Amino acid sequence: MRANRIMANLRVADVDAAKSFYTDYLGLSTEEFNMGWVARYTSPETGANIQLVTRDATASEDSVVSVHTDDVDSAYAEAQELGFEIVRPLTTEAWGVRRFLVRAPDGNVVNIVNHRD
């Protein structure tokens, strides 16, 4: 598998209530998207970013990071071949991403995802 980008998924109780700290104080002022339960904020100067997540809308467990890859299908097949626990099977979500969730041997849940461009 080839990871193109890894993004922290920070658990928050309320995206809108948490937003100003990350946008105003940390300077992550560009809202790339906000779906109510997940939002991504990015610094227009540096590209630094974070995702705020209340609770995953379609998965039974929340992930700690999102790993972006060009070939999510091969990544899924490799995770299965290696015997990793699949927390959520490979799915094309209603909002357009194709993803699956896998548990790392340390117990962390990782969201492996491909965004349509």
Image: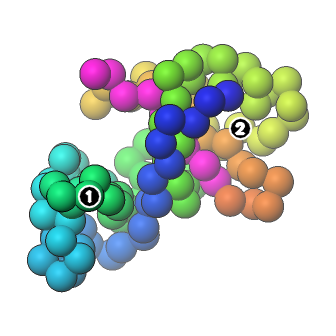
Q: Residue at x 32, y 58 (%)?
A: 49
The answer for how far apart the CA atoms under marks 2 and 1 are is 34 Å
Circles 2 and 1, Cβ within 8 Å, touching? The answer is: no
Q: Is residue 67 visible?
A: yes
Q: Residue at x 18, y 71 (%)?
A: 27
Residue 87 at x, y percent in the picture: 66, 43
Magenta residues span: 109-117
Residue 19 at x, y percent in the picture: 19, 72
* SS at mark 2 in the image: strand
* Predominant SS along the magenta part: strand
Q: Nearer the viewer, residue 86 or 43?
A: 43
Q: Considering only vertical position in the picture, is 98 above or below 53? A: above
Q: Residues within 10 Å of mark 2 (few under 14, many from 20)?
A: some
Dividing the image into 4 quarters, which one contains the C terminus?
top left
Determine which quarter of the picture holds residue 101: top right
Q: Considering only vertical position in the picture, is 33 above or below 91? A: below
Determine which quarter of the picture holds residue 100: top right
* SS at mark 1 in the image: loop
Q: Residue at x 12, y 77 (%)?
A: 24
Q: In this figure, which residue is indicated by the disc labeled 2? A: 86
Dividing the image into 4 quarters, which one contains the N terminus?
top right
Depth check, mark 2 against mark 1: the one in front is 1
Q: Which residue appears farthest toward the front when viewing the image?
A: 45
Q: Considering only vertical position in the picture, is 76 above or below 107? A: above
- What amino acid does circle 1 point to? Thr
Question: N-terminal of the two: label 2 or label 1?
Answer: 1
